[in-house]
Image: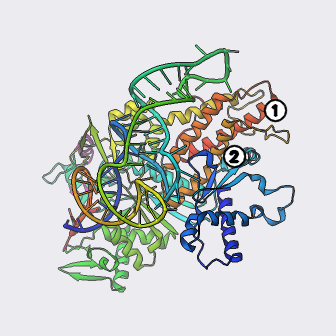
Amino acid sequence: MIREEIREIIQEAVRRVQQEEKWPGFKIPEIQIEHPENAGFGDYSTNISMILAGLIKKNPMEIAKLLIKYLDLGVLLPIRRRTPKSSPKSKFKKIEIARPGFINFTLSKDYLQKQIKEILKQGDKFGQLKIGKNKKVQVEFISANPTGPLTVGNARGGPFGDVLANVLKMAGFRVEKAYYVNDYGMQILTLGHSVLKDKEAKYKGAYIDELSKRIKEKDPEKAGQKAAKIILKEMIQKTTVRLGIKFDEWFSEQTLYDSGQVEKALITLKKKNLIYEKEGALWFKSSKFGDEKDRVVVKANDFKTYLAGDIAHHLYKFEKKKFDKVINIWGADHYGDMKRLKGAMESFGHKDKLKIIFLQFVSLLEKGEGIKMSKRAGVYVTMDELLDKVGIDAVRFFFLQKSPDTHLNFDLSLAKEQSEKNPVYYVQYAHARICSILRKIPNQKSQIPNKFQIPNSKFKNLTNHFELNLIRQLIRFPEIIEDIIKDYQVQRLPYYALDLAAAFHKFYKDCRVLSEDKLLTQARLALVKATQIVLKNTLEIMGIRAPSKM
RNA sequence: GCCCUUAUAGCUCAAUGGAUAGAGCGCGAGUUUCCGGAACUCGAAAUAGAGGUUCGAGUCCUCUUAAGGGCACCA
């Protein structure tokens, strides 16, 4: 990754300047490399001089000049390959300083050409990173109670979690996707009452009526458990499959109780002196870990609370399944639970391994008016309805575009109307167009040629502005993966896909691929094939189809 | 009352503290000898308000206004 290489040479330059020029000792800050918005400033730029200026009280322009003097472009290559022939300087057309102290890097055409071959060589592995170092990560998402169908609200985490897990996999982590099934507790009893249609019934809807007919049990708890099983199997699991999500584990809360894991966790906490009795209940000292107050784990009636199960659940994740990291994707309504759970994990020494990402709520809009979604009141739009109307690709793209912090305004009729103009088709169209071109290559058997002939040394150089811009987009893909690993902002992917598709469409408009000029045709076909690879990898990681025709 | 999110173009959303704030839809004006016009080109249009920190603020801090969520022996 060229961005990483630039980061390294800058870091090395700072280190050397620090030594040679006897700058005061300071810890070298993280080197930030970014893409300038204005293309005139080059492909990559760093603000390190301004950062250093603050630390050592010198003029940032002076610092930048000094850094450039010490830039050792040689570190771009492993030492044994540093031959005069393959001058690493050739990677850059120019390296310049711009006020107030930016150092701007412009890639050479030669370097850009070479990236086409590199992408063709790597194929569907292009974008894979090693930063995960094979560490075990679990991503738990959706985990909606098995008391009704998945709504557009509680399934929002579906595309997000699924794609985050895919990205982690791409970055070299070993990843598991999990759904925690809350099949224990009050809501199951309430579900039972609802199915029996007695005084304590709360859930409503056609599916409840249906369950009432099917379930013969008269005991509310048993009726509830049976109903939950049916809902999970026939509604929730089917919807997740329709959404294109494959969970590796459906983890039942009930099993934590059956196997005694909850009991065991409580005993351990008691030994750590973190549990005490008050007013007939058992309390966990979560206030020791920053919570506002202590929380009940065993109620006066001897039933365990959700927290008790959750502690056992996470001990299972960390101690039995040995995850190095667990990422939970929760709805914003569970914000209050974070501190107590994190506190409990801290007491077991797993504090920093648990990451919780909150997704803001989806509000329903109808004719511009907001309505509260409520499963109990029967006011909601199910994910199935949306999938029926819009289809998986548009649904996934739509949700993926949104940052988790966005309070999503959702209007079903608008979603339907807009689905035909959905940006996902813009991206898919680019892919289909490419495949159409590739089909026209003589002696091409398969629709999408997998064994594309890598151009030999006669490879004609591409110099057109649109060609080079397309390559610039292509090589960003691994950067996107790296960025998402850092901040979990998955929406970078759909926006990248749009940028890439746009770069291709512009190239297509301007550059005739199949022409009389054989060398040029060959070179452009290579670029087109490379684009197809990257587009496909991007769509695949988002769980969106890359059609060869549409 | 306290805590967490959010407020960007008419609408739905982007923008690791960087240089001229981007898309899509909608609106206005255009593009066909040729590989797929589901495309391309051009235009109008936005950082809720007030202070502050910084060489530099949509982004960080404080206050105000507005929206959503939380503050259970529910999950």
Label 1 Cα crowd, 10 Å radius (few <14 / some 14-19 / many 20+): some
A423 drawn magenta: no
Q: Residue A70: x and y, percent?
A: 72, 67
Q: Which residue is mark 2?
A: A123
Label 2 Cα crowd, 10 Å radius (few <14 / some 14-19 / many 20+): some
Q: Quadrant of the N terminus of chain A?
A: bottom right
Q: Quadrant of residue A457?
A: top right
Residue drawn 66% across and 70% down? A14
Secondary structure at numbered mark 2: helix
Q: Earlier in the sequence, mark 1 or mark 2?
A: 2
- Give the main secondary structure of the magenta stretch: helix
Q: Which residue is mark 1?
A: A519
Which residue appears farthest toward the left when viewing the image? A199
Q: Chain of mark 1?
A: A
Q: What span is colored magenta in the figure? A: A204-223
Residue drawn 41% across and 74% down? A345
Alpha-carbon distance for marks 1 and 2? 22 Å
Q: Residue A314: x and y, percent?
A: 42, 69
Q: Tell me, yes or no, if residue A61 can be seen here.
A: yes
Query: Toward the viewer: B59 or A382?
Result: B59
On screen, B25 above or below A490?
above
Left or right: where A82 falls relative to A166:
right
Q: Residue A340: x and y, percent?
A: 33, 72
Residue drawn 67% across and 59% down? A6
Query: Toward the viewer: A60 or A510?
Result: A60
